[in-house]
Image (cartoon, helix red, strand yellow):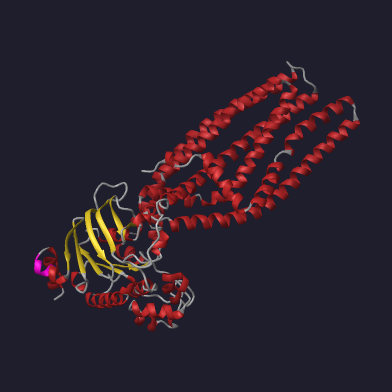
């Protein structure tokens, strides 16, 4: 189970982020760093110019007064010019870096071989925080540069104090507790946000549930709107209560540390004026530099605090990169151009990470090249999980899956999936033009109308397209201008058509893609899918049909019956019926139900 200690270290995350920016925009990064850091420094010399000004005035030295006044004006002008130039250059750098970072994050989440990070609660919490903190990635570089400049300015201020008397360096030591408390405060707040991530996800879910159009009918019919609102309020109170308690506790320590520094600051001024018998300029320098030290420390602590949040977001991004990379390391084999023997599962067992129950246990299965295989079983038997393993959304916990004798884990996930096709029961509703909604099933040919039209016919969606006002050029989704609303079954048929965009897949997976259709229509479609698959047998295509309706898959070459996470039976329809086992029993029950 991932925890904070599993995240990459702060230094590693910061170094990785800087390398990423250097690869993306090296010149802008360098110029922006120099300007932003430099803009913090001139202000630190103000105390020195004030000392010279006071000593010159007491001594009646007009030249020294003039130089000191020029120095004050020059420092202010330099700080202003550097800040303006730095902000403009950094704005350009940040815009370009933001595009690169956001594209990188989106690409990572979309191309990770496994979907484990989308389904495990602890990973979802981590990704939720990464999404919430994505804006921090955009500010990381400016925060880092500002922190470096702030530390440099702080160091110059301490040096100026030491020029009055070495003992004044102790004033900086009294400021250390403020930095320690600020660092601890940031860390404990970060851990608190990590702990409340599940509550915040529930809070967001309840809000979306109560405001989205989809659940609106059921909420109104059941009259649970007020209860959802109360539940969301109580959820918010629970997670925000932890945040508030943590902030109150850390604020008390924060105030105590600053009170300690304030007392030391007042003592230093009194000591220079009396015990050390400093000049008027010395007293003014300590007064100004000491006040600056207080202000600079506060700003440095705040910058370091914000930088810590930014680097925390960067550490989650680096974790996601390493998570993705871990799934690519073993991919050293080539995906075959065609299947000669087929796909074999040997002693395959699987349980979802972080859980105990076995979803599949000791599954031995041969999926011959060119065959149509039906996987049937009652709900919870492991049918969809088996499909996830074949698509490499997960790796087997035990055992292996081989493709023509090569371990599936050795095939690059992206290349393997480029040779897959199919449709799933939890399909996506792409609210695009109907042509694009179907075409995304094969991006290289998504704009080829003949290819889309052929997929429409293969997927049995021609009746849906015919009813659209502008055919394939119709905008789908009622929330868009001239958009058309579709029924669930119509959306499902378009998803089927999308699954048939690829002409020569090695594996065609249809995971209950017709659940919204009646049994007769599903049977007719499966007959068509099987015929299409057999017509493409020259590519050795394996077609996997998943259904909980036993009566619709009789045409399959091989029917696999899952029961209680194991393969209970397998064979043709005729063989299984003659055997009189579980398949025959369930087939008879369903057949009687449809009479």
Q: Residue at x 67, y 52 (%)?
A: 28
Q: Quadrant of residue 500?
A: bottom left
**Residue at left 59%, top 28%?**
176
Position of residue 158 measured from the top left corner of the image (x, y, whole percent): 69, 28
> Which stretch did the figure color magenta?
576-580
- Can I make out residue 108 in this image? yes
Q: Is the residue 394 above or below the residue 516 in the image? A: above
- Relative placement, left or right, of 65 versus 125 is right
Q: Residue at x 34, y 82 (%)?
A: 463
Q: Position of residue 371 (x, y in %)?
A: 26, 70
* Front one among 535 and 546: 535
The x and y percentages for residue 217 are 34, 67
Q: In the rendered view of the protein, which quadrant contains the N terminus?
A: top left
Q: Which quadrant holds residue 538? A: bottom left
Q: Viewer-proximal residue, 447 or 120?
A: 447
Name the residue at the top extreme: 275
């Amino acid at each position: 189970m991932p925890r904070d200690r599993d995240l990459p270290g702060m230094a590693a995350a910061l170094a990785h982020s800087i390398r990423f920016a250097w690869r993306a925009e090296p010149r802008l990064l360098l110029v922006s760093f120099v300007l932003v850091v430099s803009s913090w420094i001139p202000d630190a010399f103000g105390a020195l110019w004030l000392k010279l000004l006071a000593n010159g005035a007491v001594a009646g030295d007009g030249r020294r007064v003039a130089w000191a006044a020029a120095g004050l004006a020059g420092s202010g002008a330099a700080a202003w010019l550097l800040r303006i130039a730095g902000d403009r250059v950094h704005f350009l750098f940040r815009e370009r870096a933001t595009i690169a970072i956001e594209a990188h994050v989106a690409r990572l989440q979309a191309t990770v071989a496994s979907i484990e990070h989308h389904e495990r609660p602890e990973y979802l919490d981590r990704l939720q925080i990464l999404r919430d903190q994505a804006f921090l990635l955009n500010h990381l570089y400016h925060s880092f540069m500002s922190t470096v400049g702030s530390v440099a300015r702080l160091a110059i201020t301490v040096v100026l104090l030491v020029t009055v008397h070495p003992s004044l360096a102790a004033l900086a030591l009294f400021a250390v507790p403020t930095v320690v408390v600020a660092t601890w405060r940031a860390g404990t707040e970060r851990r608190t946000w990590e702990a409340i991530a599940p509550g915040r996800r529930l809070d967001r879910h309840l809000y979306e549930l109560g405001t989205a159009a989809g659940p609106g009918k059921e909420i109104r019919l059941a009259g649970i709107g007020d209860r959802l609102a109360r539940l969301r309020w109580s959820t918010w109170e629970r997670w925000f209560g932890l945040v508030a308690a943590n902030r109150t506790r850390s604020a008390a320590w924060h105030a105590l540390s600053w009170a300690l520094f304030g007392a030391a600051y007042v003592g230093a001024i009194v000591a220079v004026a009396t015990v050390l018998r400093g000049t008027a300029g010395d007293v003014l320098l300590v007064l100004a530099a000491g006040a600056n030290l207080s202000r600079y420390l506060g700003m440095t602590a705040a910058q370091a605090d914000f930088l810590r949040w930014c680097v925390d977001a960067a550490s989650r991004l680096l974790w996601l990169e390493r998570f993705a990379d871990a799934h690519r390391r073993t991919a050293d084999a080539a995906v075959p151009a065609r299947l000669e023997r087929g796909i074999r599962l040997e002693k395959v067992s699987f349980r979802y990470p972080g859980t105990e129950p076995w979803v599949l246990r000791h599954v031995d299965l041969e999926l011959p090249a060119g065959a149509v295989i039906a996987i049937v079983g009652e709900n919870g038997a492991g049918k969809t999980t088996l499909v996830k393993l074949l698509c490499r959304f997960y790796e087997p916990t035990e055992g292996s899956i081989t493709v023509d004798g090569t371990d599936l884990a050795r095939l690059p996930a992206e290349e393997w999936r480029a040779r897959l096709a199919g449709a799933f029961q939890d399909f996506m509703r792409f609210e695009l033009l109907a042509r694009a909604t179907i075409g995304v099933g094969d991006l290289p040919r998504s704009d080829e109308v003949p290819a889309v039209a052929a997929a429409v016919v293969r997927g049995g969606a021609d009746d849906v397209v015919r009813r659209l006002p502008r055919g394939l050029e119709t905008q789908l989704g009622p929330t868009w201008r001239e958009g058309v609303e579709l029924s669930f079954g119509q959306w499902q048929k378009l998803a089927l058509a999308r699954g048939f965009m690829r002409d020569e897949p090695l594996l065609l997976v249809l995971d209950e893609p017709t659940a919204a259709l009646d049994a007769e229509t599903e049977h007719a479609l499966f007959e068509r899918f099987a015929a299409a698959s057999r017509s493409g047998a020259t590519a050795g295509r394996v077609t996997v049909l998943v259904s909980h309706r036993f009566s619709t898959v009789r045409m399959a070459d091989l029917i696999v019956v899952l029961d209680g996470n194991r393969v209970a039976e397998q064979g043709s329809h005729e063989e299984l019926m003659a055997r009189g086992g579980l398949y025959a029993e369930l087939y008879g029950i369903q057949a009687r139900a449809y009479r």
